[in-house]
Amino acid sequence: MTKSIGIFVDNNFNHDIRVNRQVFQYIRLGYKVCVLCFEYTSKDSKYDDNHPFDICRIRLSKKIRNGLKILDGRTNIYYHLTRYLVGNFLKSYKVDLLHVHDLYLSKPSAAAIKKNAKHIALIVDLHENYPEAVKHYAANMKTLTKWFFNSIRWKKKEKSYLTCCQAIVTLSTDFKNQLIKRNPEIKNHKFISLPNYLDIAKFETKQQAKKVVLDWKNPENPVFVYFGVIAKRRGVNLTIEAFNHLHLEGIKPNLLLIGPIDKTETILFQKDSIFLKNNGAIQHIPWIDISELKSYLNLADVALCPLEKNKQHESGIANKIFQYMYCSLPIISSSCKPQQDLIEENQIGSIFHDLNSYKNAIKKHFDHELNSKMGKRALQSLKEKYDYQTTDNRLKNLIDILIT
């Protein structure tokens, strides 16, 4: 009899790359899949009839969801909501294992399983170093919101949210080791590492050619692209500062930014980027569909991953690294260890540690021949080592242990 996997993500399933990739991995491995997720608009469920899996969407506005998560720091209201939703889901769908996405969903899910007297294995999938992530989110909050959010509690509660699971998925082995060092009680738990590798075949089928033309004041100079949220914590402010300095020195690279601006930093971004804008050296595209990504990345010569170096960003390799590699782009990255290790091992880019080394890396990549060699190596390395389907056996072995 075919085993059934339940997956819970408290977000818009359609736009979560990691969860989408994982659902199709389970299907590829021969499991039946049922997904519990939130629906923010009626458009979210437009194509549900075409999915090769069951999907249960809970209609909830994104603002209310985010507000409840903030209040949960003092009231546990989000804990009780998610426990209730998981309980109803388990009554409606017979599953042999529940795979929940991110730390804060593990304990309410475990409570729902226990309340329903179900013998269901529980896996928590850690998308990030959550206690560190909430600390950085809280830094930009207003005083009252920050008090409700109570980010410091997650360092204290992390252990209880991990020990209630039968298995833990991390983005990297390094992050697994960090978790065990902080929480020795979980050293005998089952762990697997599922990095944000690209499912190459699936990604290729989604790409659609689109004619895109960008207007630069100095089109003969290389274009450097960043894809993702525009925010200081992502290193974008440092990037703009480096480009400003280079232009003042008479070196004029072009900067293409693709992604939404963090709402709390819109004014700061506009202020920082005005010099490059006046010099025709920066273009910002607030949003593109993932199917258009290759068309936009093909306009660039070099890709950027300037994440601030901290415990959150060192939990794994960013999705964008593998997307850049797919498009044969050399990569300039900050010294976050997972990114640095990959780039140096495969010789596909340059690492910077501060503003000056960032400027030097940009100047280095004015060399078209160097960029071409590194870009070809990036695509080759991706195909040989970092296709998501190479993790199939790892996941299958874990599931066989948990539900036999």
Image (tube, rainbow, N blue to C red):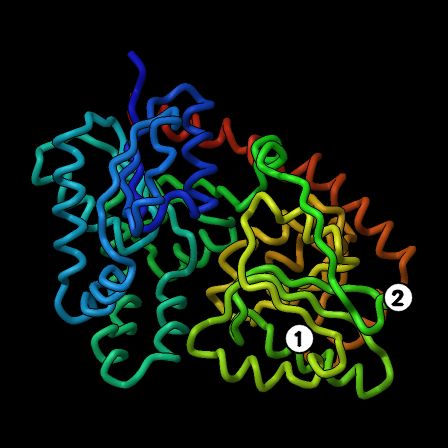
Lateral position of residue 51 relative to residue 94, left or right: right
Q: Which label's residue is closer to the chain start, 2 or 1? A: 2
Quarter holding the N terminus? top left
Q: Is residue 158 above or below residue 398?
A: below
Query: Tag 1: Cα neighbours inside 10 Å, few (<14), some, or many (≥20)?
Result: many
Residue under the image location 62 percent in, 68 percent down:
284
- Residue to which mark 1 is pinned: 239
Foreground residue among 257 and 143? 257
- Residue to which mark 2 is pinned: 220
Find residue 191 and report its horizontal and vertical position in percent.
Answer: 41, 42
Find residue 316 and report its horizontal and vertical position in percent.
Answer: 52, 54
Q: Secondary structure at mark 1?
A: helix
Lateral position of residue 393 relative to residue 41, left or right: right
Q: Quadrant of residue 116?
A: top left
Q: Quadrant of residue 256?
A: bottom right
Residue under the image location 33 percent in, 79 percent down:
141
Foreground residue among 275 and 204? 275
Lateral position of residue 307 relative to residue 123, left or right: right
Residue under the image location 66 percent in, 78 percent down:
240
